[in-house]
Amino acid sequence: MSEPITYRHWALDLAPKAAPALATTTVLILGRIWNANGAEHSVGNAALMVVLAAGAATAGAFSAGNHSGGSVIAGTAFAASGGLALAGVAGYADGLSLPVLLWALATAVAYGLAARYWRTDRREEVAHEWQTDGRREVHAHVERVEALRAGAQIEVARSGAVYAEQLASALITRAGLPGFSPQALTDAGLPELPSVEGRGW
């Protein structure tokens, strides 16, 4: 059985790879917009971002240390903490050098963390493909064996039918020979042959 050919658009494969850079770039842009609207050298705004970033980091630490907490929750909390810190620096600093440096660092860290999950997903996908191919091969082998067995049974039945037809033809031919006497064969000690009339021939 032929499998349908599926084609994935290149944008679908590129979108997950571009997500970390898009996220950090968005945070940097929003931070600079906030800077242009009065956050530059604003102690209150900087203190707010420090408190929010510290709270997110604390939540991530508690979630990572708790056995019932999931790694997704911890990763989300730490990502939020990093994003808030980047937005705070981008909004408070008066130049672009420090925000861009932190953006590059945050992007590198985001790609480092994402690469780990991408490798895990790829390994699971490959393992799933191997299992699927193995099951498909087993099913195909079973189908081939069953097809061969059915073909053999059909051939046996066909050969039996041919033999029965040939035997019937021989009996009819023998009964039609001149001077043939079934009683003479029986008297000679041979087993009695079934009567032609009884078989409907």
Image (cartoon, helix red, strand yellow):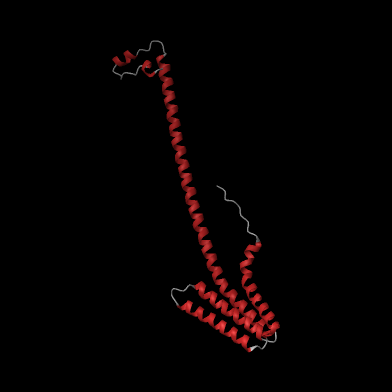
Please report the residue visible at 64 percent of the width from the left and 79 percent of the height from the top. 104
Is 198 above or below relative to 89?
A: above
The answer to whether residue 96 shows anywhere in this view is: no
Q: Position of residue 42 (x, y in %)?
A: 65, 88
Left/right placement of residue 46 relative to residue 184 reads right
Please report the residue visible at 44 percent of the width from the left and 28 percent of the height from the top. 161
Q: Position of residue 115 (x, y in %)?
A: 57, 71
The answer to whether residue 109 shows anywhere in this view is: yes
Q: Position of residue 68 (x, y in %)?
A: 44, 73
Left/right placement of residue 180 relative to residue 93 reads left
Is 56 above or below relative to 121?
A: below
Along the viewing direction, whichever of 24 and 131 lies nearer the viewer = 24
- Asked which quadrant contains residue 112, the reply is bottom right
Give the position of the C terminus as an image quadrant.
top left
- The image shows a total of numbered marks equal to 0
Please report the residue visible at 42 percent of the width from the left and 25 percent of the height from the top. 164
Furthest-top residue in this view:
179
Please report the residue visible at 51 percent of the width from the left and 81 percent of the height from the top. 58
Along the viewing direction, whichever of 147 and 105 lies nearer the viewer = 105
- Asked which quadrant contains residue 17, the reply is bottom right
Along the viewing direction, whichever of 3 and 194 lies nearer the viewer = 3
Left/right placement of residue 63 relative to residue 80 reads left
Q: Position of residue 53 (x, y in %)?
A: 57, 82
